[in-house]
Image (tube, grey):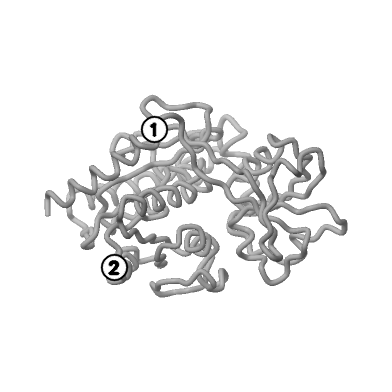
Amino acid sequence: MPLQSWLNRIWYERAAPPWWLLPLSLTYGAAAGSRRFLYAKRLRKSTRVASPVVVVGNLSVGGTGKTPLVCWLVARLIDLGFKPGVVTRGYGGSAGNVRLIDSFDDPKVVGDESILLARRTGAPVAIGRNRPAASQLLVNAGCDVIVSDDGLQHYALARDCEIVVIDGDRRFGNGWLLPAGPLRETPARLAAAHAVVVNGPRALLDGAFSMRLEAKSALNLVGGAAKALDEFAGHSVHAVAGIGNPERFFNMLRAHGIEVTGHPLPDHADLRAADIFFGDERPVLMTEKDAVKCDRFAGAQHWYVPVTASFDGGESNVLLDIVTKAMAGRAARA
């Protein structure tokens, strides 16, 4: 069994992890807590760039819905007249230095999520392990607000607003820190965030915003033709998902009445032709993050399903107001 599958069973399906993982989790927790304490007490320096920084992160490893929320936030900020840029690590790519990326860069070099962000938002995107340096590239490019996709625990980059995203289905798993559980920090960390967003209707936390990921259409990888997702209802398809929680994608398709044969892959998997061809003519639906890695070898039966973050009632306006007030507070303190 692959390591990630084994860990997922421990984190999300068992009441207690193996005893020998617990000392490792305690060590991890002590190291993470000490690191945050040093930054909080300014014994280690956080770099503050000239533009406000909004971090969209999570407490757990794996997918929670951060990237769709980043796309939503960037679009709303553009509507308000801002010039946002996005900083991300470029996970899965081979690039070693900070750099601005192009939407047609090789995902093997700059990572799959950075390509998705550049194509969906149209905003400048910078990647790199050194987030302050990558953020500075965006400031130099004229961005007046920086949105960080992930990086909640990257305290070297000073931030003005924190949004924490939680998977409403899996929540905090077994509640343990890495590696016995999926958590990077304990749930007590939520108290310091400006906003908490739960992706999905289940297990809504008091005071949190409820976000849904909506999918209405599929786009063909060869030619870009659009097709309503409901047109696949009643038909059998292959579904490919190399994301943190593949079952969320498969269940979303099933909710549209689609008969799904799921093919889960590790998060950020380096897809090859063998991963998306299955020896029959059935349509193959995949996530947008996976699709950016399949341009060179996809066929006419391959489609990707973009998702959009959505909120109930006036929650989107309230969340946006929290962000803009935090940004304004930065300007007032300057």
Give above or below for 188 relative to 329.
above
Residue at horizontal 25 percent and vertical 55 percent from the top:
52
Q: Nearer the viewer, residue 334 or 130?
A: 334
Q: What kind of residue is marked 2?
A: Gly
Give above or below for 253 relative to 143.
above
Residue at horizontal 38 percent and vertical 48 percent from the top:
76
Q: Position of residue 275 (x, y in %)?
A: 74, 60
Horizontal side of residue 52 vs 313, given as left or right: left
Residue for badge 1: 315
Residue for badge 2: 142
Q: Position of residue 37 (x, y in %)?
A: 24, 47
Q: Nearer the viewer, residue 47 or 163?
A: 163
Q: Nearer the viewer, residue 227 or 327?
A: 227
Q: Is residue 2 visible?
A: no
Q: Is residue 147 visible?
A: yes
Q: Quadrant of residue 224?
A: bottom right
Give above or below for 95 relative to 288.
below
